């Protein structure tokens, strides 16, 4: 019987075995969905602590409750391991490993290569291999496929190969793995079909495309779209400052247009593990084809300059109070890269803190999700409590991350001067004169 038919039968009878490489914020929710779909799932992660915790029923991923992990482990539906032994037995393997940037802003696909090389050692006819990690168009065909075909098996003929971008938005209670449409593109139509068969058992909607490169490009369009539009609205904010206009009022006004417009907001810069990084995968690839992705580079330049702009505004505000940055007590409110999370990755708050620290300001911070922060010179700053005294003692309070739990009336009431980079104080009436925007 043809490999596709065998897979189809194994899926239909629930006998298919699923492997997930990388048990982070993408891999673990996916493992849970396939286990809930009835498959036996083996997760592989290099982090022994994560593996051990999972097998003890403990989740290290915010969006996956430990009770869910415990139930799946106890029912034998999910186990975690720190090696690839037995991956040849798995009928489908989904790779969700990190794809960071190197210091040179070049893609680092070493985690993908390491995972693929391990899988290739036990690759057998009939297996489906899917990459989910965000990467540049061509990674699946040019990097993964040759390694998997090294022992003579052919993609599309002996085994199936596909790409399906992860679309996990940590903390998003509305869209989770199960109900976020899944894009899938295979090396051949049969590869696409094989991947689709698996995803349809665990995810509500699957959208197939003509190739792995198309699927890789779709993800990069999604996140480049955000980075470029955030860059645009940050530049609009700079224009509004020159024109003495309220950028927030301008955005709200534009958003009354029911079509052809989408809100983005200026801020202190962009953080997180996706938006600041993913577009550089695309611009890097195009550079190898002698094409310069100008919008990506320009957006990166504008977004990357926002922390300095925040420091410039802070300097102006202190100057208006006849104070210099050096020696001034500045409180940074919020350290995470976006509201209602503790994630500090690429957070612009860290850049603002670092620049002010280097200019001699006496920096304090408060973030409900981060009790302490390590500066680049190794010094550790302990977070201050969210109290009137904390605000009173600061010469300037800078709101960097607009966590929902903050009482902004309290902040404005007890602060001398507030630089609000997120329009978080928009509903505060009393003390408006103390509040300034970027
Ligand atoms: N930001 C702005 N202005 C905006 C929107 C965001 O300054 O108008 C900043 C945020 O403060 C943050 C950075 O940009 O520092 C990224 O914000 P984000 O809302 O894009 O959040 P992320 O990084 O969690 O992006 C994820 C992405 N999800 C995936 O890659 C699967 C992105 O594609 C989602 O669109 C986004 O979540 C989302 O919509 O929440």
Image (spheres, rainbow, N blue to C red):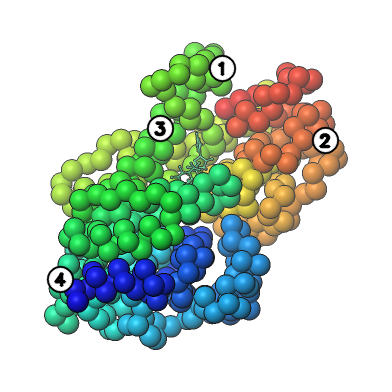
The answer to which of marks 2 and 1 sits earlier in the sequence is: 1
Q: Residue at x 58, y 47 (%)?
A: 173
Q: CA distance from mark 2 to mark 3?
A: 37 Å
Q: Which residue is mark 3?
A: 229
List the residue tagged with mark 4.
157
Residue furthest bottom in the image: 85
Label 3 to label 1: alpha-carbon separation: 18 Å
Q: Which of 340/243 is in front?
A: 340
> In the rendered image, which quarter is residue 55 located in?
bottom right
Figure check: 379 above or below 362 = below
Q: Are marks 2 and 3 in contact (CB under 8 Å)?
A: no
Report which quarter residue 411 is drawn in. Answer: top right
Query: Which structural element holds mark 3?
Result: helix
Q: Which residue is mark 1?
A: 249
**Residue 18 visible in this rendered orientation of the protein:** no
- Between marks 4 and 1, how big is the CA–CA gap? 58 Å
Q: Which type of secondary structure does the marked residue at label 4 adopt?
A: loop
Q: Name which residue lies at 66% across and 36% down.
A: 398
């Amino acid at each position: 019987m043809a490999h596709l038919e065998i897979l189809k039968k194994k899926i239909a009878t629930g006998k298919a075995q699923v492997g997930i490489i990388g048990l982070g914020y993408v891999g673990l929710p996916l493992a849970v969905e396939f286990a809930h779909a009835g498959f036996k799932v083996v997760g592989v992660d290099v982090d022994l602590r994560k593996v051990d915790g999972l097998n003890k029923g403990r989740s290290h991923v915010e969006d996956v409750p430990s009770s869910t992990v415990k139930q799946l482990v106890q029912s034998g539906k999910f186990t975690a391991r720190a090696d690839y032994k037995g991956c040849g037995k798995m009928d489908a393997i989904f790779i969700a490993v990190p794809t960071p940037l190197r210091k040179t802003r070049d893609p680092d696909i070493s985690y993908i290569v390491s995972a693929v090389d391990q899988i290739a050692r036990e690759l057998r006819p009939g297996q489906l291999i899917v990459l989910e990690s965000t990467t540049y168009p061509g990674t699946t065909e040019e990097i993964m496929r040759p390694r998997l075909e090294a022992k003579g098996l052919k993609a599309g003929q002996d085994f199936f190969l596909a790409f399906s971008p992860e679309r996990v938005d940590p903390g998003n209670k509305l869209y989770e793995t199960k109900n976020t449409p899944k894009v899938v593109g295979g090396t051949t139509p049969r590869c696409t079909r094989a991947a689709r068969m698996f995803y349809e058992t665990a995810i509500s909607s699957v959208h197939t495309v003509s190739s792995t490169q198309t699927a890789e490009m779709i993800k990069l369009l999604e996140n480049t779209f955000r980075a470029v539009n955030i860059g645009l609205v940050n530049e609009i904010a700079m224009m509004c400052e020159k024109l003495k206009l309220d950028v927030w009022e301008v955005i709200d006004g534009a958003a009354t247009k029911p079509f052809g417009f989408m809100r983005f907001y200026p801020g202190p810069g962009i953080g997180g593990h996706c938006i600041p990084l993913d577009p550089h995968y695309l611009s890097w690839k195009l550079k190898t084809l002698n094409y310069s992705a100008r919008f990506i580079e320009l957006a990166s330049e504008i977004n990357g300059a926002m922390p300095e702009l925040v420091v410039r505004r802070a300097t102006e505000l202190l100057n208006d109070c006849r104070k210099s940055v050096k020696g001034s007590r500045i409180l940074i409110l919020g350290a995470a890269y976006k509201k209602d999370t503790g994630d500090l990755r690429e957070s612009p708050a860290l850049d603002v803190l670092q620049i002010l620290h280097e200019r001699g300001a006496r920096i304090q911070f408060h973030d409900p999700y981060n009790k302490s922060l390590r500066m680049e010179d190794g010094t550790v700053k302990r977070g201050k409590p969210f109290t009137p005294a904390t605000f009173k003692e600061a010469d300037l309070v800078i709101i960097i991350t607009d966590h929902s739990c903050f009482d902004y009336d309290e902040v404005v009431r007890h602060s001398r001067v507030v630089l609000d980079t997120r329009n978080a104080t928009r509903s505060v009436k009393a003390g408006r004169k103390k509040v300034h925007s970027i």
